[in-house]
Image (spheres, grey):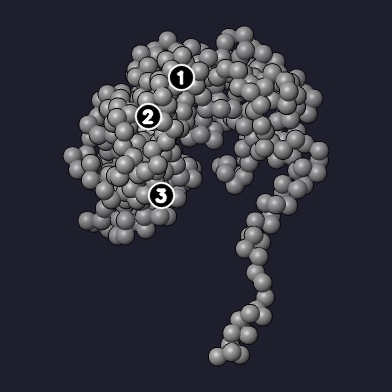
Amino acid sequence: MTDMLDDDVTQAHVDLFSKFDPLIEMRRELLATGVTDPFGLVMERVVSPTVAICNGRETILLGTYNYMGMTFDPDVIEAGKQALDDFGSGTTGSRVLNGTYAGHKAVEQALCDFYAMDHAMVFSTGYQANLGIISTIAGKGDYIVLDIDSHASIWDGCKMGDAEVVPFKHNDIEAMEKRLRRIPEGAGKLVILEGVYSMLGDIAPLKEMIAVAKKYGAMVLVDEAHSMGFIGPNGRGVAEEQGCLDQVDFVIGTFSKSVGTVGGFCVSNHPKFEIMRLVCRPYVFTASLPPSVVATAATSVRKLMHAGEKRAHLWENSKTLHKGLKDAGFQLGTEVPQSAIISVIMPDLERGAAMWEALLHEGLYVNLARPPATPANMTLLRCSLCAEHSADQVQQIIGMFTRAGKATGIIG
């Protein structure tokens, strides 16, 4: 017995971090070029939804997903301050224990009113909303059919739930139908789609895809994280815009984009939906959102119901920037503007990082997106517009891109 233990002790040490060595080397090589770390930017002060102080200088923000600019709305901020005074800084508990305050019920009611749906369930993050809902409703013996470009939180929800996962080519209706046709008769089926895909900013043909899903008896979940608030007549997302929201079984969304705070949610009309509060592990075993956060979210959601002018201005910003960058000679992720996300395709990571840094020196912050998070191993500079960007700021942005593009050789 002693010999066996001695043998165990002398076994070779395995570094559990070795699997990350290629990424560590990629990062080392990138930083060795002298570029600022594009994944470690610190905002020293945030002045408004569109401006911050970065590296000691005023910088236009074009990579925050703050689509509707609600982070500095006076009513939203006042609601958060009042909740801090009335309820304190945190709940210290799960929703099913001591973690449900009046504000949690108020924000869920605001979501029901916003979407005109019967049920709403709020999570501590948007990631947890996907993780919780997907892993709970689709389990062993069920099938999930999903777009290959789905967000990481969707993939992780699939992995956690133990259902059979069947991906299909991005936005390919025919490929989706082929997958559905092969699923055994009588099996549970869930089709997962996104309204706006965050890497390229393209939208899904939801109306056609949902019709196919229903033909094969599948339930449908649509993640509207990047469309909620500004796409659709009432800001309910791409499903509303395409006239098929009533065919969607579950809408997932987040507070960290258009709502301007943090948290996630699911809304549904399913008559049995409330049982999710007892069986969904990422909901049951997580501390609930702080009172100040749900107060700001509820106030923001209700204001977004009446934000038609802001939605129209955001669309103008998107059209202007898309045309300006295209005319300057940049290769973009979509032929026409489809959302508030405009992705600029870079030749490779090294030159993408150089362009990112050149923009930062110009006074502009965007997101550098790299493989493997991006489709087709692309390197992208991802721009997310805000309804609070002025027309002058959009023109400034076009000028900054043009100068940085020429300086780095991305455009002629």
Q: Nearer the viewer, mark 3 or mark 2?
A: 2
Marks 1/2: CA–CA distance: 15 Å
In this view, 166 is above or below 318: below
Residue 77 is marked as: 1
Q: Are marks 3 and 2 in contact (CB under 8 Å)?
A: no
Look at label 2 and name its amino acid: Phe
Look at label 3 and name its amino acid: Gly
Image coordinates for residue 48, horizontal then vertical, percent: 57, 17
Residue 87 is marked as: 2
Q: Quadrant of residue 6?
A: bottom right
Q: Is any atom of residue 395 visible in this view?
A: yes
Looking at the image, the residue that sits furthest to the left is 271
Image coordinates for residue 101, horizontal then vertical, percent: 31, 33
Q: Is any atom of residue 233 visible in this view?
A: no
Crowding at mark 2 (Cα within 10 Å: few <14, some 14-19, many 20+):
some
- Secondary element under disc 1, as helix, strand or loop, is helix
Residue at the spot x=54%, y=35% of the render? Answer: 199
Residue 157 is marked as: 3
